[in-house]
Every structure is written in C-alpha cells, then in structure tokens.
Image (cartoon, rainbow, N blue to C red):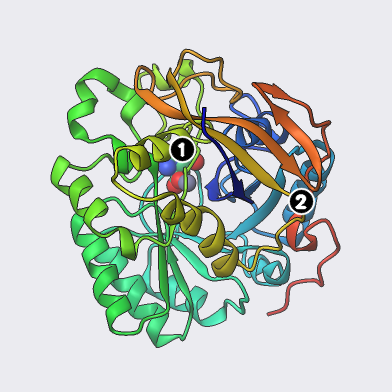
Amino acid sequence: MTRIRLPVLIDVHVHLREPGLTHKEDFLSGTQAALAGGLTIVLDMPNTSPPTTTPEALQAKARLADMKAVSDVGFFVGASTEAGNGYIACAPHTAGLKVYVNETFGPLRIESLRALMHVFGKWPGPGPIAVHAEGVALAACLALAQLYDQRLHVCHVARAADIQLIARAKARGARVTCEVTPHHLFLTQEDLPRLGSLGEMRPRLGTPADRDVLWQHLDIIDCFATDHAPHTMEEKRSASPPPGVPGLETMLPLLLTAAREGRLTIDQIVERLHHNPARIFGIPLPPETWTEVDLDARYTIGDDPLRTRCGWTPFAGMPVTGRVTQVSLRGRIVFQDGEILAQPGTGRVLFNATEETASPRG
Ligand code: NCD
Ligand code: ZN
C-alpha cells in the first residue's frame, strides 16, 4: 500500500445540471461524485435550464450551490444571442465565458461571425473565453482571440489537427490554453460498437491516431478536465440519445493507472489538475485541502457504486490501479474509504457569485 497526498485537485469542465435538469444530476450528487473522484473544486458549465446567461440566473444558481454543494464550485457564464448582453455583467463573478461555436447539448450556440465578433469584442475578463470549437471553428477562435486581444481556453480538444494547431499557436506566442478529457485519452471510435450510445459525446471519440497524437502533445495540454455530462440511462438508450458522458469519479484512477504504466508522471497530473487550472481561471485555493490516494489499490471501474445520479460510466469494466482513500477540505475530512462525510453546503461558491451584480449595460 503506497499512500500519497495530492494538493487541491480542480476539474474545470463539469455539468452539474442544476437548475432545471436535476433528474440527471444536482449540486449535491454532482459534488459528492467530485469528492469521491478526489476533486475538491469544480467549474460548472452554463447549459442548464434556464441557462446561466444573466446576473439573475447566475445568482440563483450560485445560491442553490451554496446550500447544497460539498465541494467548492465556480461558474462559467454562457454567451447567448437571445439573452442580450446579460453575460457581460456576470464577468467579475465567473471563471470565464463559455462560447459554444459547434453544435452540442442545450440551447446556447453562437455561430455567426458577427455574433462572435461581438462576444470577443465585449468580454471584459478577467476569466478567459472558453470555447467548444473544433476544426475550422477552432482556427476562427484562435484568430478572433488574437484580433480582440482575448485569452482563449479551448475545451475538450479531441482531434490530432486541433491539438497540432494549438501547439502552433502557443509556439507563436498566442494566449491560448486547452484541456483534454479522459474519454478522449482512454477511449476511441473502436470502443463504439461496445459502448453504443454510451460512447456518444461532443466532441465525438477520435481515431486511435487522434488519441495517440493527444498523448504525444502532453506538454501542450494545460488541464485534464472531465466534461462530466451526465444523462440518464433511459435518455441514452432512447431513439435520440443526448451527447455526453459522466467522468468525475473515474478521471483520477484512470490517470493514476496511466502514471503507473509510465505514460505520464504524478507531477504532470498535479500540474494539469492543480497548478494550471488555478492559474488559468484565477481560482482561490482552500487551505488544508488535499486528496489522499492509494497508488497500489486495484479494482475494476463499475464494481464500486457511483455517486453521480446518472449511475453509469463509459469506462465500466476497465481495470485501474489507484484509488481515492481520503479527501480533506479546509481541514475537515469530507470523504473517507467510500463514504461522503460532508454535509450539504460544506462547499463554497467561488468568485462571490452569490452576490448581487450591477445591472448589465449596453
Ligand atoms: C455536454 C452536455 O451534455 O451538457 N455534452 C457533451 O457531449 N459534451 C455539452 C457540452 O459539453 O458541450
Ligand atoms: Zn461540456
């Protein structure tokens, strides 16, 4: 048994589904899954119902999280053509602005060049603009970020060409960072016959060559992030399954297993789940907060009960070595040997998102 302590681990891309979609997940079940996965801070995405596109929606969401969450939670606000400029007033209270350029789950979508120019021209920061942009849309966002002097964070990079383009942008000095999900690092299209609609997500799973090129560009990957996107089994088995897979409880065991196999180091994991997320999104780190893992514990994913309300994982059946044994948040043990010990509301809301924001201007 080899136990080590990792510092505050952060997942910068999570869909906690509250308000409006709580049959899939809510602030309590989602943050319990985060703690069980060794993650003490998560950043929540805006494609809820209503979407997080105005100060009122952000504040209402933040107050729910404040009462229910057992990990710390920060929020992205979403750019939307329908909700006017409401998202701009949210800026000081958010991790960043999420812009959906490519098609995905939910109503938030910014497609036209005119609308993108508006968003890139108006976002005041300090958080970056985080984009779901693949292929040519990614090239457009890299260009817009430079033209409007914005910091760009590219969500869930999944294709060889995309990571190669980001590598080139970084080499040219662009202010761009990116994240890659465990499903794009550990699954490919070859798993689809087995997974069926449980392997459906955006971006879609890549080829084995895409996956290999992602691993070869580890130095370009700033963050690992789950894109935890729970949908119920019933929804996934329906005639039109929504894209998205859960990931909070499986990311760290998968990465620790890869570390054991010599594919990356523990330090490289910590850089991508602690140092880089905190720096990119200006996340305040809670004191006396750590995650203890047993590097030698072996088990099969799916054998343990899951905390996420959706109750399934696309990684079921995969053998892993590395288990989360204990988690401390601000000096209190909040998870130990499979048990959540934290009361709802133990987690804090980041960036003062529960506070009033000045009315949107212009
Ligand atoms: C996400 C969801 O279900 O909210 N689905 C997905 O396939 N990634 C949407 C998103 O992250 O864009
Ligand atoms: Zn997402």
Helix, strand or loop under label 1: helix
> Percent from the top left, x then y, of residue 175?
42, 79
- Residue on which the image places disc 2: 288
Please, is residue 198 above or below residue 352 in the view? Answer: above
* Nearest to viewer (mark 2 / mark 1): 2
238 sits to left or right of 80: left
308 sits to left or right of 178: right
Residue in the picture at 45% in, 33% down: 253
* Residue 39 is at least partly visible in this image: yes
Residue at mark 2 to residue at mark 1: CA–CA distance: 22 Å
Q: Quadrant of residue 95?
A: bottom right
Q: Furthest-left residue in view?
A: 209
The local crowd at label 2, few if under 14, some if 14 to 19, many if 20 or more residues have their Cα within 10 Å, is few
84 sits to left or right of 323: right
Residue in the picture at 44% in, 24% down: 313
> Percent from the top left, x then y, of residue 213?
19, 54
> Percent from the top left, x then y, of residue 345?
83, 39
Please, is residue 9 above or below residue 38 in the view? Answer: below
Please, is residue 199 above or below residue 206 in the view? Answer: above
Q: Nearer the viewer, residue 271 or 138?
A: 271
Q: Nearer the viewer, residue 8 or 232?
A: 8
Helix, strand or loop under label 2: loop
On residue 251, the disc is: 1
Q: Is mark 2 within 8 Å of ligand 2?
A: no
Going by the numbered disc 2, the residue's amino acid type is: Glu
> Disc 2 or 1, which lies upstream in sequence?
1
> Percent from the top left, x then y, of residue 227?
47, 44
